[in-house]
């Protein structure tokens, strides 16, 4: 068996299991909320410049998708569709850096008219990211004429920390904040075949935030 075939064989039988995740979600309400007929929301992440401070697009998409389905589903405008409709105010080079910049931006007459046209009621601004905070262990893999395999143990810890500010465009003010944090440790022991136990911390933070946002907005 040649090298490439053996590597493929090892990878093809690797099974991904679930690691350990601990998640918390908190909210601070500053005003009442609610959704009327024709109202919609948009979930935005930091896009002011390419940097480590940008909120991952897949996290924004995950929160949006979870808000738009299931019980108490709400109408969600896709982030890119919103940015295109609001061009050029929310492009990466011109987008506000944080929510404190929103009042002045929203007072722009042309922008205010566009927001009313698309029926946008709430703008949810998310800051945060998922980072690897620790890792350890070692693993070696070898291939010989008699076969091959991997031996060792790897572990790593990821931390997902996000905060969403909910902005009511009707009142022109913030109505509350929701934070979602998840910490998880992933493992990969290997005795011939690597067996990863993956802690899906970002997904956990996403589902927790989406669930809390849905309740916050519809039952305020």
Image (cartoon, rainbow, N blue to C red):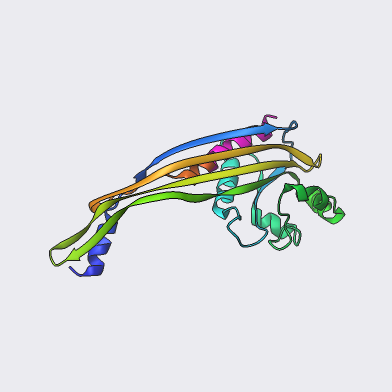
- The total number of labels drawn is 0
Is residue 73 visible in this depiction of the protein? Answer: no
Image x and y of residue 37, in percent = 74, 38
Frontmost residue, 154 versus 170? 154
Q: Which residue lies furthest to the right in this view?
A: 109
Is residue 26 visible in this depiction of the protein? Answer: yes
Which range of residues does the magenta coloring cover? Answer: 206-220
Q: Residue furthest bottom?
A: 2
Frontmost residue, 46 versus 90? 46
Image x and y of residue 120, in percent = 74, 46
Residue at the image point whose x is 81% and y is 42% from the top:
172
> Which picture quadrant has residue 151?
bottom left
Residue at the image point whose x is 59% and y is 50% from the top:
60
55 left or right, relative to 142: right
> Measured along the vertical axis of the image, is residue 52 above or below residue 124?
below
> Measured along the vertical axis of the image, is residue 167 above or below residue 142?
above
Image x and y of residue 72, in percent = 62, 34
> Which picture quadrant has residue 50?
bottom right
Q: Where, quadrant-wise, is the N terminus in this rendering?
A: bottom left
> Which picture quadrant has residue 150?
bottom left
218 in the magenta segment: yes
Frontmost residue, 22 versus 108? 22
187 left or right, relative to 10: right
**Helix, strand or loop for the magenta stretch, by majority:** helix
87 in the magenta segment: no
Frontmost residue, 90 versus 42? 90
Q: Where, quadrant-wise, is the C terminus in this rendering?
A: top right
Image x and y of residue 210, in percent = 58, 40
């Amino acid at each position: 068996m040649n090298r490439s075939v053996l590597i493929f064989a090892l990878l093809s039988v690797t099974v991904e299991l679930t690691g350990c995740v601990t998640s918390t979600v908190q909210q601070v309400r500053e005003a009442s909320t609610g959704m009327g007929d024709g109202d919609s929301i948009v979930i935005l992440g930091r896009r002011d410049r390419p940097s480590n401070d940008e909120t991952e697009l897949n996290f924004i998409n995950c929160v949006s998708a979870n808000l738009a389905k299931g019980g108490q589903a709400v109408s969600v405008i896709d982030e890119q569709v919103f940015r295109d409709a609001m061009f050029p105010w929310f492009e990466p080079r011109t987008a506000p850096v944080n929510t404190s910049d929103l009042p002045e931006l929203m007072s722009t007459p042309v922008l205010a008219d566009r927001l009313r046209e698309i029926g946008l009621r709430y703008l949810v601004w998310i800051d945060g990211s998922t980072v690897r905070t620790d890792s350890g262990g070692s693993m070696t893999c070898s291939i010989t004429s008699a076969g091959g395999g991997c031996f060792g143990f790897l572990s790593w810890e990821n931390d997902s920390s996000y905060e969403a500010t909910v902005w009511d465009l009707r009142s022109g003010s913030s109505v509350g904040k929701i934070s979602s944090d998840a910490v998880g440790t992933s493992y990969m022991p290997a005795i011939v075949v690597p067996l990863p136990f993956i802690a899906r911390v970002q997904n956990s933070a996403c589902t927790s935030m989406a669930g809390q946002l849905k309740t916050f907005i519809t039952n305020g």
